Structure formats: C-alpha cells, structure tokens
Amino acid sequence: MSSHGEPIPMTSHPVTGLRGQAEVPGDKSISHRSLILGAMAVGETRISGLLEGQDVLDTGRAMQAFGAEVTNHGGGAWSVHGVGVGGFAEPENVIDCGNSGTGVRLIMGAMATSPISATFTGDASLNGRPMGRVTDPLALFGTAAYGRAGGRLPMTVVGAAAPVPVDYTTPMASAQVKSAVLLAGLNAPGETVLREARATRDHTERMLAGFGADVTVSDEDGHRVIRLQGYPELKPQTIVVPRDPSSAAFPVCAALITDGSDVLVPGIGLNPTRAGLYTTLQEMGADLTFENMREEGGEPVADLRAKFSPDMKGIEVPPERAASMIDEYPILSVVAAFATGTTVMRGVHELRVKESDRIDAMAVGLRANGVTVDEDEDTMIVTGLGPDGVPGGGTASARLDHRIAMSFMCLGMGAKAAVSIDDAGPIATSFPIFEPLMAALGAKLVRTAP
Ligand code: S3P
C-alpha cells in the first residue's frame, strides 16, 4: 500500500538517450525546517521553492495544529505566520506525520519544551521506526514520552513545563536527533550543547543562525559542537529552497547508466554535508560536470550535467562519508551494478532504520534482477556487471519507501529487461513530479494493473 492510497504498481522499460533538463523539486530537509522554524518565529516567513511532497505537506498541517498559520500561495510560494518560541498551542487532535521520520522527530523536538502534550502517529513504515533516539535526549530536558514497545509510534509526548538545558552527545550520526535537541533547546533557559562525532547535514544550524538565534559551531576533541542560547526571538525570514540533491540523484544516476544520455539538473543544492554521492560517483569515473557554481540563500548551488558513463569502476566508499550521502545508497547500489568491479559500501547500518531496511530492500530487489549483492549489518557489496550486463526483468517491493521505488525505476532504464515495483505511491512523499519529469527525459514508466 502506498502511504496515502491504493498501491500503484509501475514498470520501467529499458530506454536509451535520456536527454533534457531536469528541474527537480525543493530540498526536503530545508522545506521541513522552513515550516517548523517559520512557525517558531514571530511574524511572517515567506518560502519559495518549497517541496510540495506529502512529507512536507504533513509537516505544514502539523504546524497549523500547533497554532501557526500556513498558507499556500501557489507555484511553490508559501508563507508561515509563526507563534514565536514557546508559543505553540496544544493540538486538538492526533498529529499524523505520514511517512516522515524527519517531520515527526523535528516536531517532537520543537514542542518538547512547551507545557503541552501531543500524540503522534504515521503510516505503517513510520510507526515501525525507532523514536527512542529522539525521546531519550528530550527526556533530559524534562520531556516525557509514552509510545508502543521499542519506542514506536503512536506516541504521546508531554512537553516539559520547566525545561532545563542539556549537553548531549549523539550516539549515532543523525541530523534528525541533532535537530530535535536543538529545536527543544530554543525554549529552554541557558545554553544547550549538542556534540556529534561525525558531522551530519547542517541545515538546522545554518537556518537557526539565519533566523537570528545565537548559535555557534566549533571543533572540540574531534567532535563537532553546537552551542545554542535559549529563548531567542526568532525573526521571520525569506527563504529560497534550493533543489534537492537527494532527488537530483535519480535523474543524474539514470543518465549515467542509460546509453546515450545527457541530462542537466539546474540549481541543485551542494551543501558539503549532503554531497557525498557526487564525490563517490566522480571517483567511480562518472561523467559529471558542475557548471555555474554559486551561492543562493546561504547554500552552495550548481547546475549539474550528467552523461552516460560506460567506464565506471567499482570502488570502496569510506564509512566517514556515509552521513553526507545516507539517502543516496539505494541509487548508488543501482549505479554500482552497471560499473565494472565491486563496490563496497561500509558504515551503512543506519540504512536499516530508514523508511525501510534499505540494505535488505535493495539487496532483495537487485538479486531479483540478476545482480549479486552481499551484505552484513553494516556493509553492502554490489558486484558490477558492466554497462550492458544488468539483466533486469524482476519485480521489487518498494516497502513504503520512496527512494527504494525510484531506485528500481532507474534500474529498469539501463537494464536489458524491464523492472517493476509493487507500489510507486511512496514516491509522492519526496518527488511528486518524478513520473512526468523522468518521462520528459525519455524514460518509459508504465503504471501496470495491480
Ligand atoms: C534528514 C536526516 C537524515 C535523512 C533524512 C532527512 C534530515 O536522517 O536520512 O532523509 O532532514 O534531518 P537521519 O538524521 O536519521 O540520518
């Protein structure tokens, strides 16, 4: 089942010559944060280029439930009239975050230090994901959480009435955990300190500074340390959301593995904490050109051209790169199938607690399409078959996971035979225009009968 409707089985047929310009939607991470920080500012934040995927729409609805005014002006232009730090009202009903781990975890943080309660739920995928990683540090502020076994949703979070600031070291590389703690720290007195052993995407820190919070980042004893002063008055902002490098990965990688392709993706965000895939692809020998490098809205941006790359080689992707490309391993495992030699992806255990167990989902689906994959808890190894060697012809389960669904649709474009998925519905969570955008480049995606 898709997250919000009947399953949509889909087949991707082999094609040649993907060509044209791929205007991918706005960045999902920045879109969530724009709505949440906009809701915590005093006055009106204007956002252009917001991702209008289901995940972000669910976060917008949640912000309304907490008392902010969220308005869609059309064409990706939105405004949020915020209630200020500490101004959240208690929601009248259950907050449904759909498929979005980022949405629920950041919102839990944002409300955790207000004297209100909220009950959160989601779809079958989200309700199976661990929330303890967020509620454990929130408990240090004085927040209580009552969920199902294993810290799963549905869960009621009781905000701390008299929060205390915390000094917390994240036990896993997670921007969601980091962001939940920092958002909670906004409505706590004094200084909240967050330490991470491995840098994760830094949009929350950048945007908090942009909204006027007193936030500093430093290196201390090999940790990245973020210090945030509580009770700022966040000033409303005008935000231009860059295009999502994680969504761009699909047309880019489809071009690399499809004979005769030449695709330009304009204006994609290339924040270094997000760009690990592109470094990896270049190491493999992908034909990528970054044009017109510039800065927009405080984020590095470029136009990226990707051409068919028949000479890619398998490589070892180092574990320290994992956080900067954590959402891109599924599509990298597809590209690896078209390279010559073996691609070894280490340090990827976090993939097991995403929208699906992404190591298992990719391994099972790739094997069904004639690709050899080895795995252990923390590693995925794909044996490349070269540019003409991937059989395809199989069906994969999308497992309520947008990135799994899109990865297998890209596999079909370069394979010898069509590749099918049981449900393309989840794609709408992050890339609602995937189907027409890929079709305009020359992909052949066909909705098939269930
Ligand atoms: C995100 C952080 C990552 C990523 C997710 C978006 C964010 O999750 O997988 O798609 O916007 O903070 P983790 O923080 O759990 O690694």
Image (spheres, helix red, strand yellow):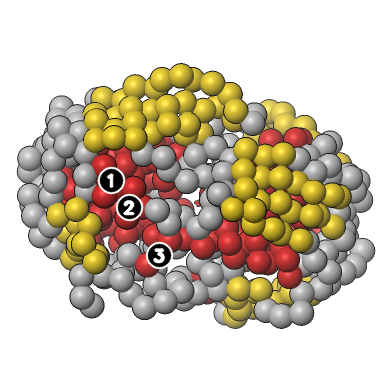
**Mark 3 is on which residue type?**
Pro
What kind of element bears circle 2? helix
C-alpha span from label 2 to label 3 = 15 Å
Residue on which disc 1 sits = 440
What kind of element bears circle 1? helix
Residue on which disc 3 sits = 426
In the displayed structure image, the side of residue 27 where residue 253 appears, left or right: left
Labels 1 & 2 near each other (Cβ < 8 A): yes
What residue is rendered at 73% in x and 70% in y? 65
Towards the viewer: 83 or 136:
83
Towards the viewer: 123 or 56:
56
Labels 2 & 3 near each other (Cβ < 8 A): no
What residue is rendered at 92% in x and 63% in y? 162
**Residue 156 sits above or below residue 354 on the image:** below
Towards the viewer: 250 or 128:
250
| Residue 143: % across, % down | 79, 67
Based on the displayed image, in which of its 4 quarters is residue 208 positioned?
A: top right
Residue on which disc 2 sits = 436
In the displayed structure image, the side of residue 40 where residue 276 appears, left or right: left
Label 2: few (<14), some or many (≥20) within 10 Å? Answer: few
| Residue 263: % across, % down | 29, 33
